[in-house]
Image: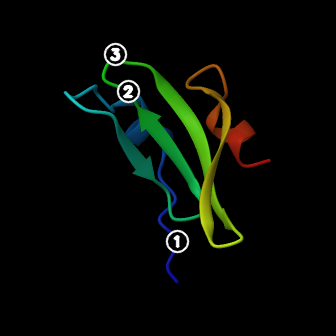
């Protein structure tokens, strides 16, 4: 599977839309962009056949480098 790891500029340029949306990077991490303009890191995984999400903090307070460690 090819990895689609985005650069910081992709996340910085994300603008709010009418509905919440995510920008996935191909390795279970995603940036949730909310309609009010906030940006939140999410780790999306499956356990027991169910999809779960774990929050890591907001962007840019939690940096691009810190999300991968």
Mark 2 residue element: loop
Query: Who's the residue at 30% across and 23% down the image?
Result: 35
How far from the left and from the top, in percent, is residue 15? 28, 27
The residue at the far bottom in this view is 1
Q: Say if mark 3 contacts mark 1, CB within 8 Å.
A: no
Q: CA distance from mark 3 to mark 1?
A: 29 Å
Give the residue number, with chain letter if any, for mark 1. Answer: 3
Q: Measuring 48% from the left and 47% from the top, which residue is drawn there? A: 7
Residue 31 percent location from the top left of the image: 49, 40
Q: Is residue 10 left or right of residue 1?
A: left
Q: Earlier in the sequence, mark 2 or mark 1?
A: 1
Q: Percent from the top left, x then y, of residue 46?
A: 65, 66
In the rendered image, residue 2, in percent from the top left (x then y), is placed at 49, 79
Q: Residue at x 59, y 42 (%)?
A: 42
Q: Quadrant of residue 56?
A: top right
Q: CA distance from mark 2 to mark 3?
A: 5 Å
Q: Classify mark 3: helix, strand or loop.
A: loop
Q: Residues within 10 Å of mark 1 (few under 14, many from 20)?
A: few
Give the SS element for disc 1. loop
Q: Residues within 10 Å of mark 2 (few under 14, many from 20)?
A: some
At 33% across and 32% down in the image, what residue appears?
A: 14
Q: Are marks 2 and 3 in contact (CB under 8 Å)?
A: yes
Residue 62, disc: none
Q: Which residue is mark 2?
A: 34
Residue wearing tag 3: 36
């Amino acid at each position: 599977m090819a990895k689609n790891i985005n650069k910081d500029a992709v996340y910085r340029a994300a603008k709010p839309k009418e509905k919440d949306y995510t920008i996935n990077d191909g390795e279970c991490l995603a940036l949730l962009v909310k309609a009010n303009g906030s940006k939140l890191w999410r780790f999306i995984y499956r356990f027991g056949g169910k999809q779960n999400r774990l929050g890591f903090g907001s962007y840019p307070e939690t940096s691009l480098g810190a999300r991968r460690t």
